[in-house]
Image (cartoon, rainbow, N blue to C red):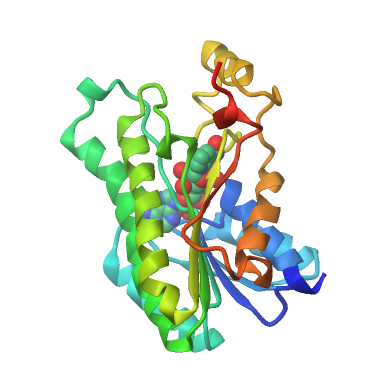
């Protein structure tokens, strides 16, 4: 369908080497976009590139560390030169810390905020400047259920993800005059390398019990929302957070 067609669009998916980022990269390529995946691990990135190419899509990878401003700025500059423009940005890089809040050290706290919030900001800043020059763009940040509600032993993570929502809304307002839409996706619980160790036993049982659909998300179920937010279909949508959680947040008691 024309509304969701991403042919002739270039998409940068940061964190595209695994999990939800990989699924969104594959989905965007399936809708016709040329996809560039970025992250620290070149092997993981190449797996995504090969998966996209095997499906008949176009993909490239760039090694980039969002903890490092130079790495982000230099890589974004290289991509912009090589591909002419970046139409779509997905910020899916992230990290997690499960620890009782009173035991979290300064370094542990800073590491989570640096990756999830400051890293997302760094990429938005570098790519946002390119999009302003082009007078169009779609930025999709990845929030969390933890942007809205507490998650057990995850204060640094939830604080970082609450920050991502307000970063998204501020950018949506500032970049609206430049025809750039900035939105966030708040995924529920999807089994990935980020959380597989903690998705066990009583915790997993509680998540399933509190999810009306009684299951975890499967990673490809995030792709359609990414395609929507990257496409013409969402041209009047900005500053929004779309939740994909099997009904988790909708359920009071
Ligand atoms: N899975 C869930 O249930 C869930 C729920 C809500 C929100 N989320 C969010 O979804 C996003 C993706 O997570 P995921 O579940 O798909 O886990 P994942 O498979 O572990 O993906 C995280 C990605 O972030 C990249 N990354 C981490 N630090 C980086 C850095 N400094 N620079 C560049 N890339 C970096 C990793 O790649 P490298 O190791 O190659 O750098 C990895 O590919 C995260 O923001 C997460 O918070 C996940």
In the rendering, at what x and y percent does residue 99 appear? Answer: 32, 24
Front-most of residues 109 and 211: 211
Does residue 32 sit above or below 240 in this rendering?
below
Front-most of residues 18 and 157: 157
Does residue 61 sit above or below 140 in this rendering?
below
Q: Quadrant of residue 152?
A: top left
**In the visual, does 158 lie left or right of 216?**
left
**In the visual, does 18 lie left or right of 101?**
right
**Which quadrant would the N terminus be assigned to in this image?**
bottom right
Residue shown at 76%/65% (left/top)? 30
Residue shown at 56%/63% (left/top)? 237
Residue shown at 51%/32% (left/top)? 195
Front-most of residues 253 and 186: 253
**Which quadrant would the C terminus be assigned to in this image?**
top right
Does residue 8 sit above or below 23 in this rendering?
below
Q: Visible in this render: residue 75?
A: no
In the rendering, at what x and y percent does residue 220 appear? Answer: 71, 47
- Kindly give the residue lying farthest to the left in the view shown: 106
In the rendering, at what x and y percent does residue 186 appear? Answer: 52, 44
Does residue 226 sit above or below 232 in this rendering?
above
In the rendering, at what x and y percent does residue 125 appear? Answer: 34, 70
Number of marks in the rendered image: 0
**In the visual, does 186 lie left or right of 190?**
left
**In the visual, does 176 lie left or right of 234?**
left
Q: Visible in this render: residue 126?
A: yes
Front-most of residues 6 and 94: 6
Residue shown at 41%/42% (left/top)? 95
């Amino acid at each position: 369908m024309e509304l969701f067609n991403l042919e002739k669009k270039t998409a940068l998916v940061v964190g595209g080497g695994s999990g939800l980022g990989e699924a969104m990269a594959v989905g965007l390529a399936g809708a016709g976009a040329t996809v560039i995946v970025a992250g620290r691990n070149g092997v993981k990135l190449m797996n995504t590139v090969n998966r996209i190419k095997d499906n008949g899509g176009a993909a490239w990878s760039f090694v980039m560390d969002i903890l490092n401003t130079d790495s982000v700025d230099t890589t974004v500059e290289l991509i912009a030169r090589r591909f002419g423009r970046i139409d779509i940005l997905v910020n899916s890089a992230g990290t997690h810390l499960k620890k009782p809040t009173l035991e979290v050290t300064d370094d542990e706290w800073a590491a989570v905020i640096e990756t999830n919030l400051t890293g997302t900001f760094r990429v938005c800043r570098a790519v946002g400047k390119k999009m302003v020059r082009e007078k169009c763009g779609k930025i999709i940040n990845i929030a969390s259920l933890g942007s809205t509600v507490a998650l057990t032993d995850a204060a640094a993570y939830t604080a970082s993800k609450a920050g991502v929502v307000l970063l998204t809304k501020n950018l949506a307002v500032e970049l609206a005059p430049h025809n750039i839409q900035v939105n966030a996706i708040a995924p529920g619980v999807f089994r990935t390398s980020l959380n597989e160790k903690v998705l066990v036993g009583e915790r997993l049982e509680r998540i399933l019990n509190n999810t009306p659909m009684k299951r975890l998300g499967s990673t490809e179920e995030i792709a359609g929302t990414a395609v929507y937010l990257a496409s013409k279909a969402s041209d009047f949508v900005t500053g929004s957070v779309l939740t994909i959680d099997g009904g988790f947040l909708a359920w009071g008691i």
